[in-house]
Amino acid sequence: MIELQHIDKYYNIGTVNEVCLFKDFNLTIHDGDFISVIGSNGSGKTSLLNLICGSLGAEAGKIILNGEDITRQKEYVRQRKIGRVYQDPAMGTCPSMTILENMSLADNKGKPFGLGFGTNRKRVSYYRELLSQLGLGLEDMMGSKVGSLSGGQRQAIALLMITMTPIEFLILDEHTAALDPKTAELIMKLTDKVVREKKLTTIMVTHNLRYAVEYGNRLIMMHQGEAIVDKAGEDKDNLDVDDLLDRFNQISIETGN
Ligand SMILES: Nc1ncnc2c1ncn2[C@@H]1O[C@H](COP(=O)(O)OP(=O)(O)OP(=O)(O)O)[C@@H](O)[C@H]1O
């Protein structure tokens, strides 16, 4: 479980551009939740993810991960427990290294060993097995540089790599936004499979309302630093894309933009 308690977040403090994004913001993400977060540009989605993973600090409040107060914990420490897949496929993999080397690197995350540890015959066949489960034929391309792969292939590998070692929480940061519709669909299905199989507690920011409706057990709509919609279970299942579009339109009428 991850809890954001009484979070205040300001930008540009002490300047004429000072803005308060979050004021007494509270959110509890339960074990096994798969949350889709939607919201207009500037509503606070990325800031929320950055607060959780530690690349952004809050002015007040606490972040508790499975009972541990991680509020002051550095980002690289949190990375052992929190995995993140980014919008840009280049962010999660090393392009100048082969698929095998990338897998080995991810496999050895946090271990005091060199690459050699991960590339013995047994591990190689394990990586081959993991890659074949993606159904993209990447198991026959383990010697290829990751930089030569398509965006979809790289996102699939990034997802595999981030979930290879046990993590407590998965962040998906618009991870299908840079992909063509067919590849995005494939990566979404793959994501859903990985999240279910590994029972990962997950938060996914997306601008794709259909994905937000179809995937996960909970949906949050952000607006001006507040979760103005938070539906789970049956209430979430009853939502459709038109309901969400109506809500967007309503906000735009209320705020005049
Ligand atoms: N580094 C920063 N300095 C100043 N203001 C910032 C900074 N980062 C974000 N903001 C402001 O905080 C608000 C929320 O931004 P954020 O990027 O979290 O929104 P978002 O919902 O992720 O938007 P988008 O959908 O465009 O990615 C915006 O008004 C933005 O201008």
Image (cartoon, grey):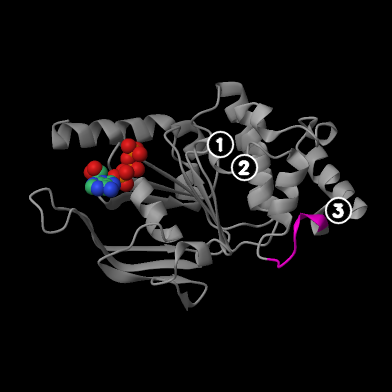
Q: Quadrant of residue 6?
A: bottom left
Q: Which residue is mark 2?
A: 93
Q: Position of residue 9 (x, y in %)?
A: 25, 59
Q: Position of residue 202 (x, y in %)?
A: 54, 53
Identify the element where label 3 is drawn. Answer: helix
- Name the side, left or right, on which 125 lies relative to 1: right
Instruction: Name above or below for residue 5 compared with residue 98.
Output: below
Identify the element where label 2 is drawn. Answer: loop
Q: Give the residue type at disc 3.
A: Arg
Instruction: Name above or below for residue 9 compared with residue 187.
Output: below
- Name the side, left or right, on which 11 lies relative to 116: left
Q: Viewer-proximal residue, 228 or 194?
A: 194
Q: Viewer-proximal residue, 172 or 97?
A: 97
Q: Give the residue type at disc 1.
A: Ala
Taking the spot 39% from the left edge, 72% from the top edge, the residue there is: 72
Is 112 magenta? The answer is yes
Taking the spot 61% from the left edge, 37% from the top edge, the residue there is: 155
**Ligand 1 has an atom within 8 Å of the beta carbon of the residue at disc 2:** no
Magenta highlight range:
111-116
Say whether disc 2 or disc 3 marks the residue closer to the N-terminus: 2
Q: Which residue is mark 3?
A: 123
Identify the element where label 1 is drawn. Answer: helix
Q: Quadrant of residue 167?
A: bottom right
Q: Position of residue 28 (x, y in %)?
A: 42, 64
Instruction: Name above or below for residue 169 compared with residue 130.
Output: below
Q: Outermost residue, right direction?
A: 121
**Is there any visible trace of residue 56 in the rendered image?**
yes
